[in-house]
Image: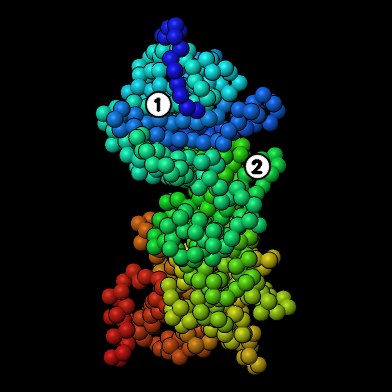
């Protein structure tokens, strides 16, 4: 739209806003003060809606077709007048429209915003950056807003001028506008005149409205240059374009802009979904983890939510579970209301569906990478493998799928992240009894563990789990492909006895008696003591109770400051070990007690447990050594 002229003879009419607008506006302005720039997003988005509406209505209304021009949104900076103007050549408004849309708070996005205010200014301000608040947000920065508008189907002299200082009243007068469309003129309050800078305005437009599909230009008043002003936004939002048209380089560039990552993404997934609900999603798998990925579990800024190409918020937590927090991307919904809030998103069935699709597509992408294998997959495992493990705990619905993507070290392949559960089962042959694993602090500790002795004798592979998360993982992953996961420390596994090694009943009885003696000597320190069927080299080990708390887990909980109940470990002893033989033979009661305590201390130490009385342990060892 171009010129405006006052229509002679039409007196301005003053009207009151319908409710306590003044108070409400004040509240909003306070809450939004630190996010003031969003006013431009709101005005541009209204302009874009108006252009959409005109295009849509012109499809069926022949008269309107002649009105449709090249759609354009212009932001004009007029420093001399302390004014910013947002102009569009969209559908425009009739006088009734203006009264209804700009005269009543209840109709606008502002009303919904105000309803959701908590009264806590800080929380409200935080909430708002991601909110559609509507036209009235202009009053965050302006002390007077003037709207001149003419409906596309109305005559030139049916223009309307609306003007208000946002304090409870507005004036309305007829005017003549040579072109249909809407012009919103903001007279900036003194505090906000720093916004009268075209470069700054361009930055704001790019930040919030880069993917509006109509061209946006920012011009400075008095700029006489003949060149057409440059279009500030990227009118062709990448994600809404057909996949076949998009070059890899464009995806890569888009990812880098989106994520700030200087590297290229490893993979992307781009989908357009049409149906009861329409949306586009574009997801990226980065090549490297941000430095704080492991511990910064709550900061998920990866996936942006757009609604009809208008940026709404970083909605990663609504769109992605924690264990996929490394995924980057964009979701653009055609169906969510623009004035959506985080609270609304929290329990929006629409969004639940999108979220499920995002998870499915993200897992597809990771599976594809796994199938391709190679360097990229190894890197993925190194960077994100441990975070993915959280999924087994967090996302029961996808547990089996996620478990299939996990990789571990094992007694067969010791490199970290190399063995999948499927590999394990395939290697285990016909009828694997279980997937055996052992958790601990380091590979060295695990490889030296007495719990592995029986397995190495029997040639059975054991997964070696050394990441802190593994302890929790095995508490949630009970089986894979129908096979139970079992701890090698539980004592359930028995190595096949060697020829002629079967103990006679008499020997068996002797061993049981010895265990009884040791239990008596150790008193309150142990639960059960039993002869071990699995130890070959070590003298003793702790038998973990199946499903119980491991020593490692107890220690981790303690370190985290949690109360851990006392427990009495079960002890297994190797009757064939010389130390045990000495204990059985000696007649010296004190020495026998010392040996018994040593057997227990050793077993605890080797499993990464803590000794309640380390000084006593050292004393006992020294005494034995010097004896
Ligand atoms: P919302 O956009 O959430 O409806 P707003 O307060 O931003 O709330 O706007 C209220 C209404 O005013 C819009 O729904 C629209 O009908 C009308 N409107 C606002 N800006 C324009 C514009 N530039 N062109 C045409 N109509 C507009």
Residue 347: % across, % down: 56, 37
User: Does residue 388 lie above or below 320 as drawn?
Assistant: below
Residue 564 image point, x, y percent: 40, 58
Query: In this view, which residue lies farthest toward the right?
Result: 430
Judged from this view, the residue extending furthest toward the left is 190
For marks 1 and 2 on the same chain, the one whose residue lies earlier in the sequence: 1
Residue drawn at the location 62% of the way across and 85% of the way down: 458
Q: Is residue 410 above or below residue 563?
A: below
One can see residue 55 in this view = yes
Q: Specify whether 422 is left or right of 563.
A: right
| x 52%, y 61%: residue | 252
* Residue drawn at (63%, 66%) of the image: 368
User: Residue at the location (47% across, 27% down)?
Assistant: 2
Of residues 349 and 136, the one nearer the viewer is 136
The residue indicated by pointer 1 is 185
Relative height, residue 140 to residue 393 (above, below):
above
Residue 121, position in %: x, y?
34, 31
Q: Quadrant of residue 21?
A: top left
Residue 618 falls in image quadrant: bottom left
- Nearer to me, 504 or 135: 135
Residue that label 2 marks: 278
Residue 127 visible from this viewpoint: no
CA neighbours of label 2 inside 10 A, class few (<14), some (14 to 19), many (20+): some
The secondary element bearing badge 2 is classed as loop
The image shows a total of numbered marks equal to 2
Alpha-carbon span between mark 1 and mark 2: 35 Å
């Amino acid at each position: 739209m171009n010129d405006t002229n006052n229509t002679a003879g039409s007196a301005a009419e003053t009207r009151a806003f319908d409710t306590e607008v003044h108070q409400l506006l004040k509240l909003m302005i306070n809450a939004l003060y630190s996010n003031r720039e969003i006013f431009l997003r709101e005005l541009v988005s209204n302009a874009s809606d108006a252009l959409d509406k005109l295009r849509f209505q012109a499809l069926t209304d022949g008269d309107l077709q002649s009105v449709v021009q090249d759609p354009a949104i212009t932001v004009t900076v007029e420093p001399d007048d302390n004014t910013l103007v947002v102009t569009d050549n969209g559908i425009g408004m009739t006088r009734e429209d203006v009264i209804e849309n700009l005269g009543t708070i209840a109709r606008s996005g502002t009303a919904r915003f105000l309803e959701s205010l908590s009264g806590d200014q800080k929380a409200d301000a935080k909430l708002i950056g991601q909110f559609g608040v509507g036209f009235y947000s202009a009053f965050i920065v302006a002390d007077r807003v003037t709207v001149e508008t003419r409906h596309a189907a109305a005559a030139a002299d049916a223009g309307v001028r609306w003007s208000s200082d946002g304090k409870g009243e507005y004036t309305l007068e007829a005017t003549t506008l040579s072109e249909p469309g809407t012009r919103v003129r903001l007279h900036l309050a003194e505090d906000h005149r720093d916004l009268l800078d075209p470069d700054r305005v361009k930055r704001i437009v790019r930040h919030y409205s880069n993917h509006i599909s109509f061209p946006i230009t920012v011009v400075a008043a008095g700029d006489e240059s003949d060149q057409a002003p440059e279009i500030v936004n990227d009118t062709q939002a990448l994600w809404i374009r057909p996949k076949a048209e998009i070059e890899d380089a464009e995806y890569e560039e888009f990812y880098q802009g989106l994520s700030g990552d200087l590297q290229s993404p490893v993979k992307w997934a781009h989908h357009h979904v049409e149906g009861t609900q329409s949306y586009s999603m574009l997801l990226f798998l980065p090549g490297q983890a941000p430095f704080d990925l492991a511990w910064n579990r709550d900061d998920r800024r990866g996936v942006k939510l757009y609604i009809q190409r208008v940026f709404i918020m970083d909605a990663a937590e609504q769109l992605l579970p924690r264990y996929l927090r490394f995924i980057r991307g964009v979701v653009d919904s055609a169906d969510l209301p623009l004035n959506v809030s985080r609270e609304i998103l929290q329990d929006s069935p629409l969004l639940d569906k999108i979220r499920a699709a995002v998870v499915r597509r993200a897992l597809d992408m990771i599976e594809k990478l796994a199938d391709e294998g190679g360097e990229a997959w190894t890197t993925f495992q190194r960077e994100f493998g441990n975070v993915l493990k959280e999924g087994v705990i967090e996302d029961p619905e996808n547990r089996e799928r996620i478990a299939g993507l996990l990789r571990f070290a094992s007694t067969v392949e010791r490199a970290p992240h190399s063995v999948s559960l499927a590999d394990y089962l395939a290697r285990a042959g016909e009828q694997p009894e279980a997937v055996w694993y052992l958790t601990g602090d380091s590979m060295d500790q695990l490889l030296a563990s007495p719990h592995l002795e029986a397995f190495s004798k029997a040639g059975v592979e054991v997964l070696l789990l050394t990441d802190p998360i593994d302890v929790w993982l095995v508490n949630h992953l009970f089986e894979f492909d129908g096979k139970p996961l079992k701890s090698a420390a539980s004592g359930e596994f028995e190595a096949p006895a060697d020829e002629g090694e079967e103990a006679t009943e008499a020997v068996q009885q002797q061993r049981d008696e010895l265990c009884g003696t040791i239990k008596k000597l150790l008193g309150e320190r142990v639960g059960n003591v039993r002869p071990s069927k699995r130890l070959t080299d070590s003298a003793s080990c702790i038998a973990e109770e199946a499903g119980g708390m491991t020593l490692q887990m107890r220690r981790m909980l303690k370190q985290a400051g949690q109360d851990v109940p006392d427990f009495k470990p079960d002890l297994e002893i190797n009757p064939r070990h010389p130390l045990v033989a000495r204990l059985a033979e000696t007649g010296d009661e004190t020495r026998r007690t010392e040996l018994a305590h040593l057997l227990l201390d050793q077993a605890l130490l080797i499993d990464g447990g803590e000794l309640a009385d380390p000084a006593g342990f050292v004393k006992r060892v020294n005494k034995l050594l010097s004896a």
